[in-house]
Image (tube, rainbow, N blue to C red):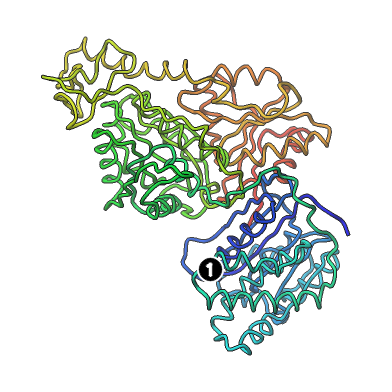
Amino acid sequence: MLGVRDAYILLGGPQGSGLDTAMRILSRFFASLGYSVLADREYYSNIRGKHSYVHMRVSATKATSLKYPVDVAVAMDVESVFIHFRDVSRGSYFVYDLGTESSTIEDAKALEKYTAMRVKELLKELGISEYVGDVVKWLRSEGVEVVGIKYSDLINELVKYGVPRNVATRALSTFAATAATYLVGIDPESMVSTVEDVFRGRASVIEVNKLMIKASVSALRSKVPKVSKELGKPELSEDELLVVTGNEVVAMGKLVGGLRFQSYYPITPAQDESFYMEGKDLLKVGDKYLGSVLVFQTEDEIAAIASAVGAALAGARVATATSGPGFSLMVETLSWAGMNDVPVVITYYQRGGPSTGLPTRGAQSDLFFTLFAGHGEFPRVVIASGDHEEAFKDAVEALNIAEKYQVPVIHLLDKFIANTVVAMPVPKTEELVIERGKYYVGPGEGPFKRFSLDEEIPTRTFLGMSPITYYTGVEHDEYGRISEDPELRIRMYVRRMRKLEVIDREVPQEHRAVLYGSESGDVLLIGWGFVKGAATDAIEELKSLGIKASYLHIKYFMPFPSRRVREVIKGFSKYVFVEHDYLVQAGMAAKLFAGIEVRERIVKYTGRPIYTNELVDAVLKLFKEGVKEVVLRYGA
C-alpha cells in the first residue's frame, strides 16, 4: 500500500446539510492524530439549499495551501456529481449515491441557470449524456475509483434502530466524513471520540452519529476492501494542535493581547470573531487570569466605531470588526480618530464586492480603500495577514501599534482566512509583549497638552482620570481647543503625519515584507494575504520543474516597505504580482510608494481562493508563452 504525505478531500452537498459540522469533525479528528489540516468551506449566501462544499488538505508535515485534483470526493447530492466530477483524476476516489444513477442535471433543482449551462456544455464537449450514471461511466473510463453507495440504505439502517428518518437523513454528513477518512487509510471508528467531543452534552445526537459511522464503514468495506494509498504517519513535532477558524484565532490574539472593548455590527464574514468573544467573559491563559472583555453589538457600524473610539478615549484597549459595506459606514469616524490621535483597531475581513457583491466569497479588492478611506490626510497603519499563525500575532501587533503610535490600525484579512479551519501549533503566549505607549493618569490642574508639539508621539491621557482634556473634530491647538491659525495648522498637520516616518524608522522593513526562498533567481512572486500559502508551496513545485522561484510576502501597506521591495526585486530576472483582484492593488501600491512598474500579473477574482496547481501552471505560462497576465478560474 502506497503511503502519502498529503491527502486532498472534497465534500459537496446542499447548504444546510451538515457539511460545516463534517468539516469540524474531520479537522479535529485528524488534528487529534497529529496531522496538520487546512480546510476551506465555500458556500452561497443563502440559508439552505444552494451548493456548498468543503475542500480540505490533511498533511503529515504542514498544510499551507489547497490544490486540485483531490484524492477523495464525496458527492452528497446530484448537483455535487455534476459540479465536481472534474475535480478528481486517475487513482482518485469519487463517492456518490447509487440511487441517483438515473437522475439528470435537470434534477439538480438548486443549480443556477448559468452554471447548468456551463456544465451542459462541458458534458457535450466530453461526449457525456446528462445522466449521473453516464458521468460515473466516464469517470471509470478515466481511471477514477468510483464508489457507489445507496444512501437510502444507510438511512434505513438507522431507522431500524428507532432513529427518525429526518434525523437519519441529516446524519448523511457524517457518512461523508466517514468515507473521506476511510478512503485515505484511517480507521473511521476511531473518529467516535471526536464525535463525542463535538456533540458533548447531546447524547441522542452522539448515538445517531455513532450508528451512522458503523453503517458507513460496513458499506464502504463491502465496496472497497482495501484502499490504494494511505496517509503516512504525522511528522509534526508539536505536542498539541489548535483547531480554529481565522475568525477565532484573531479573537484569541486580541484577547491575550489585552483587548478590553470590542464593538461590532453583524456582517459576513466578520461577525464570527465577535460571536466567539461573547462566550469569553473571563480571560485565562494557563493559571493566569487576564481580566474581562466587553463585547458590544451596536445598532450599526457607525455606532460600532464611535463606541470603540469613545472607549479608547476612556483608556480601554479597543477594536471593532467589520467587512466592506460596514467599513464604508465607519469612514467619517475613522477620520475623527485620525485627527485626534485615537488608538483604535479595525479588523477588516474582505469579501467580494462592489456593493453586496459576493458576501460569502473572498477577495483582496479593498486594499486601496483602506489606504485612503477618509477625508483629508492623517496617519494610519495597514497590516495584512497571510495565514492563521500570522493573524494571531498580527492581532496583538495591531493593538500595540495603535496605542504606541496613537493611530488607527486597519488589520486586513480576507474571507479565505476567516472561514478556513486549520490545525496549527498552539501560540506561545509567553512571547507576547503588550505595549500601551505613553500615557498619564495622575493628578493635575488646568488643561492638559494632549497634542503636544514637543514630542514625536504625544503623551495621551484618559477621560475622567486626568487633568482637563479637549477633543474636537476640527483643527486644534496643543490642548485640543479649536484653532484655524495657518501656522499652527502646519505644525499640527506635520506632527500628525510624521508618525508614519517614526513607524517606518522603528518597525523593520524585513518584518513588513518577508522573503520566502533565496534572494535571487528566475522569478519572484509578490503577493499578500491568503496568497501566501499557495505561493510558498508553488515556489517548491517550480524548483522541481527547473524554475528558481521565491515569494515576497507584503505585510505592511502603510507605511509601505519601499526600500525592502526595491532591494529584493533586483535579485530576480522576472517579478510577478499575484492577487485576488482585478487591478493588482498591491502592485499599484508598489508603483505609488516604491516606483515599481507592474509588468506581469496573475490574478483571480471569482471569489474562490488561488490553488497551488493553477498558480504553478500560470507561472509556466508566463515563461513559455510570454504573456503578461493570467486570469485564474478554477473552483466551483
- Residue visible at 55% across and 64% down in the picture: 198
- Residue visible at 67% across and 29% down in the picture: 516
- Residue 72 position in % (x across, y down): 74, 62
Q: Nearer the viewer, residue 81 or 64?
A: 64
- Residue visible at 30% across and 41% down in the picture: 305
Circle 1 packing at 10 Å, graded few (<14), some (14-19), many (20+), is some
- Residue 449 position in % (x across, y down): 20, 17
- Residue 71 position in % (x across, y down): 76, 59
Quadrant of the drawing holding the C terminus: bottom right
Q: Which residue is labeled 1 in the image?
A: 199
- Residue visible at 65% across and 54% down in the picture: 31
Q: Nearer the viewer, residue 269 or 616?
A: 269
Identify the element where label 1 is drawn: loop
Residue 613 in the figure: left or right of residue 606: right
Q: Is residue 408 above or below residue 177?
A: above
Task: Spot the residue most to the right.
Answer: 1
Q: Is residue 350 above or below residue 142?
A: above
